Image (cartoon, rainbow, N blue to C red):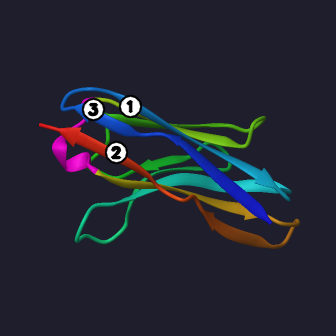
C-alpha cells in the first residue's frame, strides 16, 4: 500500500505565491507519474500539472507560466510552486500518483486534498 501526504496550501492574496508538496511512502517499486489536480466548488476535478517518468511535464493552459511542477525522486516527493495566483486558482488541490507496484503493474493513489484560497 502507498500513502500520499500533502503539505502546504493556505490563504494568500492575489498575485502571491504558494507551494505544495506531496510525499509518497510505502511499497514503491517506482514512480510512473505524479501530479496535481484541483477541484473548485461546483466544478469537476481538473488536471493542474503532471510530471512523468523521463522528465516530461504537462500543465493546464490556465496555469502555464505561473505554476511549476517538480519531483525529487530520492524522496518520492512532488512539488508544485504556484506564483501570480488568481482568485480562480482557489480550490482543493489533490496530489495524484501512478506508482509501480512491480515491473508490470501500477496503481493510482490520491492525497487527502489541501485547500488553496486566493483572496482578491
Give the alpha-carbon distance from disc 3 to disc 2, as whole Å: 8 Å
Chain-order first, disc 3 or disc 2: 3
Residue 90 x %, y %:
26, 49
Residue drawn at (33%, 27%) of the image? 17
Give the quarter of the figure containing the N terminus. bottom right
Under circle 3, the secondary element is strand
Residue 101 x %, y %:
83, 66
Vertical side of 64 occupied by 91: above or below: below
Mark in front: 1 vs 3: 3
Q: Are marks 2 and 1 in contact (CB under 8 Å)?
A: yes
Q: Within the image, what quadrant is residue 12 found in? A: top left
12 with respect to 49 (left or right) = left
Label 1 CA crowd tier, 10 Å (few <14, some 14–19, many 20+): some
Q: In the image, which disc is placed on residue 116?
A: 2
Q: Are marks 1 and 3 in contact (CB under 8 Å)?
A: yes
The residue lying toward the viewer, choosing from 115 and 57, is: 115
Q: How many marks?
A: 3
Which residue carries the number 3 mark?
Answer: 12
Label 3 CA crowd tier, 10 Å (few <14, some 14–19, many 20+): some
- State which region is magenta: 84-90
Chain-order first, disc 1 or disc 3: 3
Amino acid at each position: 500500500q502507498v500513502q500520499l501526504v500533502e503539505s502546504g496550501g493556505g490563504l494568500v492574496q492575489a498575485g502571491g505565491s504558494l507551494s505544495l508538496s506531496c510525499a509518497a511512502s510505502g511499497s514503491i517499486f517506482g514512480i510512473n507519474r505524479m501530479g496535481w489536480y484541483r477541484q473548485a466548488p461546483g466544478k469537476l476535478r481538473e488536471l493542474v500539472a503532471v510530471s512523468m517518468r523521463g522528465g516530461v511535464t504537462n500543465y493546464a493552459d490556465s496555469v502555464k507560466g505561473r505554476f511549476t511542477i517538480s519531483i525529487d525522486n530520492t524522496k518520492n516527493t512532488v512539488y508544485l510552486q504556484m506564483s501570480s495566483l488568481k482568485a480562480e486558482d482557489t480550490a482543493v488541490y489533490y496530489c495524484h500518483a501512478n506508482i509501480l507496484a512491480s515491473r508490470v503493474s501500477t496503481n493510482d493513489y490520491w492525497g487527502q486534498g489541501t485547500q488553496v484560497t486566493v483572496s482578491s
